[in-house]
Structure formats: structure tokens, C-alpha cells
Image: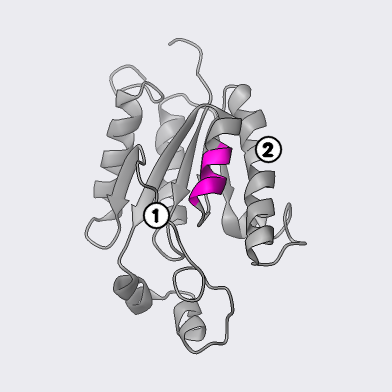
Amino acid sequence: MTEQMGFTLWFTGLSGSGKTALAKELAPLMRERGLNVERLDGDIVRQSLTRDLGFSKEDRDTNIERVTFVAKLLTRNNVAVICSFISPYIARREKSRNQIGTFVECYVECPLEVLIERDVKGLYKKALAGEIKNFTGVSDPYEAPPNPEITVNSGTQTIEESLAIIVQRLEELGYVPRQEEA
């Protein structure tokens, strides 16, 4: 196999849409194909790298700015980086794309009604009751990507169906070797 080319796969979507679930399932699949993989996840990063930040627009942008820096370093060192962040603002995601360079955006779409129904962490209930301020998709905006390289819908697709779409697209783009090549 030729040397791995680093890239960043950036999952974006509302809270509870399945970004982390997909990333957790995708990472071992990519490792099985011989790739060095690192996962950067919103919940984990906020416990360490960005624990000093809140959820204002400025703090959200700073959060993504720091993650972008780490992803850029890993990408340029031939690592496949999987990022799972709500990252609600198009302009900030575009800055990340430009800074990282080899960037694949994956929009994990899911209707708000399904997310409210799912509400694993109870966050939507609290946000709708006004107990959580600046909650993306409720009291703060989420700007869906206009032209992502990949779109999956966790409201209508199983994790397996979404993963198949993601892997196939990454193969087409030349970032992940096809099963028979791995």
C-alpha cells in the first residue's frame, strides 16, 4: 500500500444527531484498512483542551479554532482525523477547511422532531424549557452546510447504512483504500 495521506473528516450536525456514534464505529473500520486514525470529539475536547470555554458564539468559534489547529497538525503528519463537533457556523467550518487543507465535511442531518424525541441526554427538554441558554437548534442557530462532500440522515438511516455511505465516499475520494486493497 502507498503511504497514507492525511485528511480530516469533519462531522457536523445538531446535538444528538449521531456524529459521535458514527465516528466511534468508523475509526476501527479505517484502522482495519491500515490507516492511522485519531478521533477528536466535542464532549471529550471540552473536558480538556477547551474546558475554559462556554457556549457563546465567540467561545464556540474559539473551541473550533483550537480543534482545527490540532486536526491540521495531525493531517499534515498523514493521520486520518475524525472530528465530531456541532460546529454550527458555516464561516468557521470554512476557515477550518482552508486551514486544514485536506478536509471532508460530513453533514449528519436529523430532523429536530426526531432529536427531541430521542433526546438521550435530556438537553432538548431543558433547552425548550429555557433552562439551557444558547442551545444550538433551539435558542441558537445551526447553519447546515450548503455543499458537504457527504450527507447522511440519522433520522431515516441506520448507523450501518450511514457508515456504508461515508466509507464509499471516502474510497471514491481516495482517502480510504477499498476493502480488497487494504
* Element on which disc 1 rests: loop
Residue 54 to residue 95: above or below: below
Outermost residue toward the front in this view: 91
Percent of width and height locating residue 47: 70, 60
Rendered image: mark on residue 116: none
Q: How is the image coloured?
A: one colour
Quadrant containing the C terminus in the rendered view: top left
Q: Nearer the viewer, residue 125 or 89?
A: 89
Count of numbered tags: 2
* Element on which disc 2 rests: helix
User: Which mark is nearer the camera, 1 or 2?
Assistant: 1
Boundaries of the magenta span: 90-96
Distance, label 1 to label 2, CA atoms, is 22 Å
Outermost residue toward the right in this view: 52
Q: Nearer the viewer, residue 34 or 150?
A: 150
Percent of width and height locating residue 17: 39, 61
Res 86 visible: no
Outermost residue toward the top in this view: 2
Residue plotted at (62% across, 23% down): 76
Q: Determine which residue is flagged by label 2.
A: 69
Q: Is residue 53 left or right of residue 1?
A: right
Percent of width and height locating residue 9: 47, 38
Residue plotted at (32% across, 16% down): 181
Q: Determine which residue is flagged by label 1.
A: 144
Residue 172 to residue 70: above or below: above
Q: Residues within 10 Å of mark 2 (few under 14, many from 20)?
A: some
Res 161 visible: yes
Q: Residues within 10 Å of mark 1 (few under 14, many from 20)?
A: some
